[in-house]
Amino acid sequence: MESKISMEIGGRVRRQREMLGISRERLALYLDVSPKFIADIELGIKGMSLTTLMKMSSALKLSTDYILFGKSEKTDLEPLLKAFSLCTKEKIQYAEELLKLFLKAIAN
């Protein structure tokens, strides 16, 4: 059971890291850990300390509740909205066009 939970936590970390365009190496530098340790967290092989969790939350712009439990205080769109908040106006317009194309494609 613990392994499944660790894998879910790791999946949330990986998805947000990738969505923000942050490499494992860059995240590892910020957290003062090795890139291998980040990979192990993402694969559910290892857990993290509270200090690392707090730094991870800050770096990935996610609540600790979302990282640990997959629950967000606001909506499930919170990680996506936070990613958009880091984009330039031009990139947001591009993302909106992609989203419209995606929604049109799945509607058919």
Image (cartoon, grey):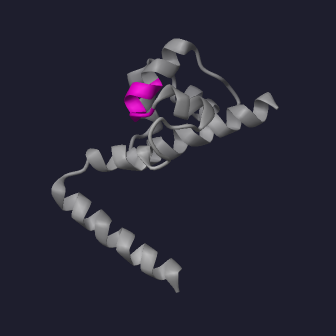
- Inspect the magenta stretch and tell me whether residue 76 lies in it: no
Is residue 54 visible to us here? Answer: yes
- Is 78 on the left or on the right of 92, as rendered? right
Quadrant location of the N terminus in the rendered image = top right
Is residue 44 visible to us here? Answer: no
Q: To which quarter of the image does residue 47 belong?
A: top right
Residue 80, position as x, y percentages in the image: 41, 50
- Inspect the magenta stretch and tell me whether residue 57 lies in it: yes
- Choose between 37 and 93: the one closer to the eye: 93
Residue reaching furthest to the front:
74
Q: To which quarter of the image does residue 59 belong?
A: top left
- Residue depicted at x 31% and y 50%: 84
- Residue depicted at x 43% and y 44%: 79
- Is 70 on the left or on the right of 80, as rendered? right
Q: What segment carries the magenta color?
A: 56-62
Residue 11, position as x, y percentages in the image: 61, 42
Residue reaching furthest to the bottom:
108
Please tell me how many numbered marks the rendered image carries. 0
- Residue depicted at x 45% and y 41%: 17
- Choose between 60 and 81: the one closer to the eye: 81
Magenta stretch, main secondary structure class: helix
The vertical placement of 30 against 61, above or below, is: above
The vertical placement of 49 against 63, above or below, is: above
- Is 51 on the left or on the right of 80, as rendered? right
Residue reaching furthest to the right:
1
Residue 70, position as x, y percentages in the image: 59, 38
